[in-house]
Amino acid sequence: MKYLIVGSVILNDMLYADGSTAHGYLGGTIYSVNGVKPWEDDLLFITKTGPDYMKEIGSYLTDNNLSTDGIFPTLRKTIYSRVEYKPSGEWFEYSIYDDYSFEDWAKESRFKPEEVLQFCTSDTRGMYMEMGGDYEGFLKELHRRSPNCKAMWEIPTSHCNDPQYHEATMARIKVSDIYSLNLPESKNLFGTASEEESVAKIIELGVPCFFRVGTGGSYMIQDGKAWYAPLVDFGKSVDATGCGNCSTAAAMYGYAEGMHPLMTAIKANIASGINAAQFGPYLHFTPELRARINEIADQLFQQLIGDDGKKVQSKPQVFESLYK
């Protein structure tokens, strides 16, 4: 497979800051699958789930022609979480099960390197991974088996906010092919006070980075330069859950394909915009949808390339709904 997405399946109940709720939606790294799937079919999702996974994600896999070869039904049950959003934008997540905590689930769902590396070939171009353990050793073996593969590390929020992780996080950035973080995470990790300072710090580090600034859009930063693309809005934004995972995986795809950095940021923002337009991940990608979003990506690229990467316009770029 050209692209591998490694991570979790979660079922979510959401409690939003305004008191509204949503129940029983797919979550976790399914959102990252939705970052690559709009652009590419040669994709394998690698995850550990409960034994009833076809009941939970079967229709998603079938509708999108996704293989089950990477599904390991080895958990006691698929984790089910409650996500609570605060007016500040912060959110908190915990298991709804009394007998199956996030700590239990995290231990059971951890991958051994060979469970993932068995899917890596000379044709593998990119990997999005949520994995712990010996990161540096895993990357060395990944690159030995798949010399052209670019691995994306989306830095966990806790690794940016907690000082105990600082040294290890900075070391991991230096050995990463590409990494991603958002604006609040960058301020905590780098000790910066503004978006501009964070961009400058990322450029100084010299490792390709997809830098997310929320409703302000995103930057693809590589080769000593930051390329900015504004948010893409497909009508009303319904639920921003998973937009970070979605756009980060799309940026991994763009970088691995050798796209212009501006196009990488644009396609990441389009994937995020699709995701935000409904509750849960978008469930069915069609040839017609792919043709339309590629047309939009080309249109935005021609519009923004004249800005030479500068943040000249930051207002969301609004397009008609993709939902018929």
Image (cartoon, rainbow, N blue to C red):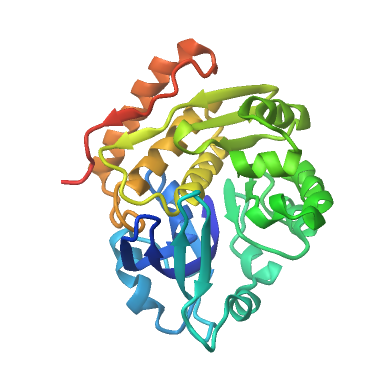
Q: Position of residue 55 (x, y in %)?
A: 33, 78
> Farthest residue in the top direction?
306
Q: Is residue 81 above or below residue 50?
A: above
Pick whichever, 253 or 224, lies toward us: 224
Q: Is residue 315 above or below residue 307?
A: below
| Residue at x-position 64% and y-position 53% | 157
| Residue at x-position 41% and y-position 68% | 12
Pick whichever, 125 or 21, lies toward us: 21
Q: Position of residue 284 (x, y in %)?
A: 28, 55
Q: Position of residue 282 (x, y in %)?
A: 32, 54
| Residue at x-position 65% and y-position 71% | 111
Q: Position of residue 189 (x, y in %)?
A: 73, 44
On the question of residue 178 being in view, the answer is no
In the image, is 241 to the left or to the right of 23? right
Pick whichever, 203 or 157, lies toward us: 157
Splitting the image into 4 quarters, where does residue 173 fall?
A: top right
Q: Is residue 8 above or below residue 293?
A: below
On the question of residue 236 being in view, the answer is yes
> Farthest residue in the left direction?
324
| Residue at x-position 58% and y-position 46% | 125
Pick whichever, 120 or 59, lies toward us: 59
In the image, is 91 to the left or to the right of 15? right
In the image, is 312 to the left or to the right of 15? right
- The mark tally for this picture is 0
